[in-house]
Image (tube, helix red, strand yellow):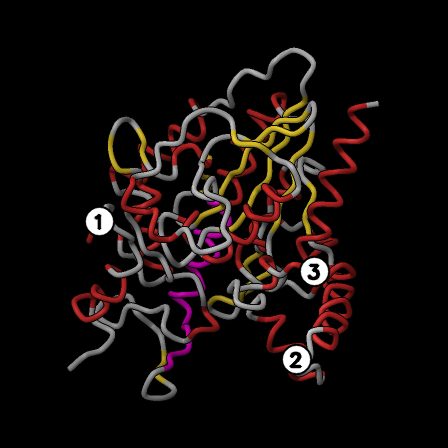
Amino acid sequence: MNLMSRENRFHESEIKIRKPFKIDPSLCIYSPQENVDSLKHPKIKSWMEFIKKDWTPHPTPKGYKRLALIIPCTKYKPYITSREHKAINSSLLMDGWEPIGESKAPSELTKFIEDGDDPRILHEGSLKKRNLILDRIVISEPLGLVPYEYIYFWKGEQSPATSYDDPGLFESRGTSISPYRDDCTALKVSDKKWKWGDSERNSYVYMHNYLAELIAFSLKRVSKNYHSIVAWVSPGLTHRSFLADHKIRTKEGIPKSRKVNGESKKLCGVLEITPEILEIMPTIEELKLSQQNLEKRLKKEGRYSSPNSVLSVYARGDGNDTPLGLKETLDFLQKRLNQMSNKESK
């Protein structure tokens, strides 16, 4: 049995989409080559045209400033039901941000509201605090950007954002390959791991730079609507690379290129295309402080606090999947947004 066939991987993809939504089998994307092919998919083409040309933030009321917070796409969809997004949104709600308008969240999703959760945790609308309005936007492969208001529905139908599974750009996992394709050049290195070849790396560079250009173009078009844009993305992951410029790549060790057929192909990020359009958080310094603060909390709570224990809890976000959902890390996001709020209220 070929465990890497599309048929055998489909069930794993299917369970990532939470009811009442259903996965679109044609939007299961398992390799860099399939990511490039997805750019021709009618749903993705239509979505990208919308993001590039038609998506516009709601009008900002007089006396208010509008901010954008870019957060990562997640394994489970709708994104808002993931532990990472729930942690981020809980932090915002606890800090006084209030949802605007009525939510269109399907009633079937209420089972993901746990004890202690704010009942508004699944609200996809903009948030308001003092004289600021905050729009949440998801950075996604293969969709580029997904404004939060469209995470459930778009044009009266299930959103493409709740219809896909795309683990196809994560080289380190060793499974982002399509061995059934004629253009697969990946090398099998163990029973469950593969190493990318030239075709995978070439397609990765193409898709990476295509999405960076799409995101840069779209953000530049709507940037006049925003006072500030903050991206809350993890170091070392693809989303950070989509955004980073040369300086950030050098500082954080993010790859600047990929070798294809003996030649280096440059990876380009949003901040190289449109400098200073957004601020990337958390910084490396903030993440180091988060680990130090986490160690103090673990000791206070009587939990294991050895260096390895701290790193383990940190990597999993203390149950929230990633460091972006860790309380100590989110403190820095709250602080940054409050700085903007205090500055604008003066």
- The answer to which quarter of the image holds residue 278 is top right
C-beta proximity under 8 Å, tags 2 and 3: no
Task: Rate crowding at label 1 as few (under 14), some (14 to 19) or many (20 or more) other CA atoms within 10 Å.
Answer: some
Q: Label 2, on which residue?
A: 303
First in sequence, mark 2 or 3: give its number: 2
Position of 127 relative to 286 (above/below): above
Looking at the rendering, in which quadrant would you find the N terminus? bottom left
Which element carries disc 2, helix, strand or loop? loop
* Residue 277 percent location from the top left of the image: 67, 35
Q: CA distance from mark 2 to mark 1?
A: 40 Å
Give, as a single range, the part of the protein colored magenta: 193-211
Residue type, label 1? Lys
Per the rendering, the mark at residue 22 is 1
Foreground pick, 290 / 33 = 290
Position of 215 relative to 208 (above/below): above
Left or right? Give the position of 286 relative to 126. Answer: right
First in sequence, mark 2 or 1: give its number: 1
Q: Label 3, on which residue?
A: 328
Q: CA distance from mark 3 to mark 1?
A: 35 Å
Q: CA distance from mark 2 to mark 3?
A: 16 Å
Which element carries disc 3, helix, strand or loop? helix
First in sequence, mark 3 or 1: give its number: 1
- The answer to which quarter of the image holds residue 240 is bottom right
Residue type, label 2? Arg
* Residue 232 percent location from the top left of the image: 62, 49
Left or right? Give the position of 331 relative to 111. Answer: right
Residue type, label 3? Glu
Left or right? Give the position of 223 relative to 104. Answer: right
- Residue located 35% across and 32% down the image: 104
Which element carries disc 1, helix, strand or loop? loop
* Residue 205 percent location from the top left of the image: 48, 56
